[in-house]
Image: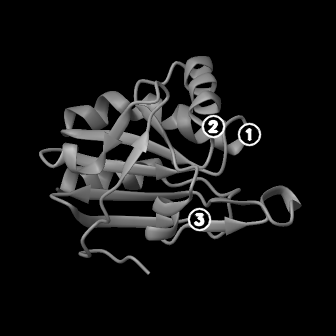
Amino acid sequence: MLNVNDNAPDFTLKNTKKEDVSLSSFEEKTVVLAFYPGAFTGVCDTEMCALQDNLKSFNELNATVLGISVDSPWANGSFSKQYKLGFDLLSDVNRTVSTAYDVLFEGLGGIEGYTCSNRAVFILKGGVVKYQWIAPNPGVEPDYNEIKNNLEKL
């Protein structure tokens, strides 16, 4: 399990434009990694919109948000466009990043054999985990004020 003060596993994933985005390219910024189970799935819609609503204050704290799901770049692209998200959504189609961050969830929506990312938030600074929150189940949203408060402390 990945804990606070552990080195964050680096990764390269495709964004909605099918461009490579590497975590290591954000070394000078604080990164909010927001894993979510799937585009257009109710709670995920609410979560991504809440992150968008907080984006300006996160950016003012030198933080960037990256959303990660197992969805394709096309699904993430439609999702981002519908909600006018101002941050990258990345596709972990091989589930390697979700595995590295220990946030895989089996059987979303009662679909046996379907593995997705659980809802989780990690705050990374200088390649180190400074905060982590993993939902007890995918229906639970993070505490957005807690995310902001932790960013303010860095």
Tell me the distance, in whole angstroms, between the alpha carbons under discs 3 and 1: 15 Å
Q: Residue at x 20, y 43 (%)?
A: 25
Residue that mark 2 sits on: 46
Where residue 50 appears, as percent x and y from the top left, is 52, 36
Instruction: Work out which quarter of the rendered image holds the N terminus and state it.
Output: bottom left
Residue 135 in the image: above or below residue 42: below
Sequence-first disc among 3 and 1: 1
Q: Residue at x 29, y 39 (%)?
A: 64
Sequence-first disc among 3 and 2: 2
Query: Looking at this rendering, what residue extends furthest in the bottom direction?
Result: 1
Q: Element under label 1?
A: loop
Foreground pick, 10 / 143 = 10
Q: Residue at x 69, y 44 (%)?
A: 43
Which numbered marker is on residue 145?
A: none
Residue that mark 1 sits on: 42
Where residue 128 appears, as percent x and y from the top left, is 22, 66
Q: Are marks 3 and 1 in contact (CB under 8 Å)?
A: no
Amino acid at dot 3? Ala
Residue 112 in the image: above or below residue 81: below
Q: Residues within 10 Å of mark 1 (few under 14, many from 20)?
A: few
Tell me the distance, in whole angstroms, between the alpha carbons under discs 3 and 2: 15 Å
Where residue 109 appears, as percent x and y from the top left, is 83, 56
Where residue 78 appears, as percent x and y from the top left, is 63, 23
Q: Element under label 2?
A: helix
Query: Looking at this rendering, what residue extends furthest in the left direction?
Result: 28
Tell me the distance, in whole angstroms, between the alpha carbons under discs 1 and 2: 6 Å
Instruction: Work out which quarter of the rendered image holds the C terminus and state it.
Output: bottom left
Amino acid at dot 2? Thr
Residue that mark 3 sits on: 135
